[in-house]
Image (spheres, rainbow, N blue to C red):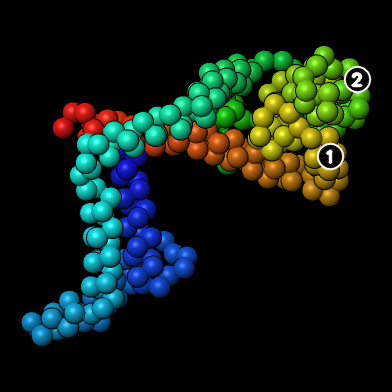
Amino acid sequence: MAWASFLFLALVTSVKSTLGFTSCSPSLISTAVFNKLERSRCSSPLALHDMVADPVITDTFHSSSSLLLSLIKKTDPSEARGVFWFTFIASSGGLGIGAKQVPEILKDLDNIKALAGVGPTLGGEELKTSKIATLIYPVALSKKDVEKVIKSVPSCAKISAQGDSTSYMASGGYIDRADFSKALRGCNPLAIRAVFDALSEGKGSYASPTTIDAKLEDWRGKGGINAFAENLQSAISTKLSSYLALAFIFAIVADLCIENAIQGWFQ
């Protein structure tokens, strides 16, 4: 359930605030409390009493438990119905737009998987990327294939002139992914897609000419293939983060609607 994540986050935040941490992990919080317990040397009832009376311990658990109880308390049916309708109506427009993106996302991932083993390849050494890349690309990228694409990318003006896209973004000078692929016929399709993903920074099917020129200059110069690999990794992270954020929003809204519907009409 989505609320479980909120409860954990609320608990961690409350403990952090009480212990005076501005930036720390839950493990650091538990270590701080443990150190308090260890210093108490609970070898006698008196030591145990002193430990329990320690303001750091008591304030931490008191604030945390109070926050948790406030989050999971039973809601009045009329209030729950109001929250349900507000959440349902307020989120319907945005979620409707988001829901339309889901089939497009799945279709795009299927299209990428379909590129495995398609088209010419120079083979050779695999491009070094993290395991996260396997969530997007079905097979390892050939370093030579990627280098060939980077070397062969024509100017943005030429891509636009030879392209077929008539979209608003394309008319504004942005490079459409389909036009980019068309300009690189003869290169490996999966490598073409990976290069475009890095150029677009994982943000969609269009790339800014300014970004393209800057990144290509870096990849063809001092940065080389290592700079490309770093940019690709960043693009993949951005892409996956957007997918997870969309799924998280859906889960939160669904949880709010379902829980308040239950408390509002089915108690």
User: Is residue 226 rendered to the left or right of residue 243?
Assistant: right
User: Is residue 86 rendered to the left or right of residue 242?
Assistant: left
Say which of 223 and 31 sits in front.
Answer: 31
On the question of residue 113 being in view, the answer is no
Query: Which quadrant, please, contains the C terminus?
Result: top left
Say which of 125 and 9 sits in front.
Answer: 9
The crowd level at tag 2 (other Cα within 10 Å; few <14, some 14-19, many 20+) is few
- Amino acid type assigned to the residue bearing label 1 in the image: Thr
Which image quadrant for residue 237? top right
Taking the spot 91% from the left edge, 20% from the top edge, the residue there is 161
Q: Look at mark 1 in the image and give the residue it sits on.
A: 210
User: Is residue 44 rendered to the left or right of residue 107?
Assistant: left
Q: Which mark is residue 161?
A: 2
The crowd level at tag 1 (other Cα within 10 Å; few <14, some 14-19, many 20+) is few
Which image quadrant for residue 115? top right
Taking the spot 28% from the left edge, 69% from the top edge, the residue there is 60
Q: Are marks 2 and 1 in contact (CB under 8 Å)?
A: no
Check disc 2 and report its element: helix, strand or loop: helix
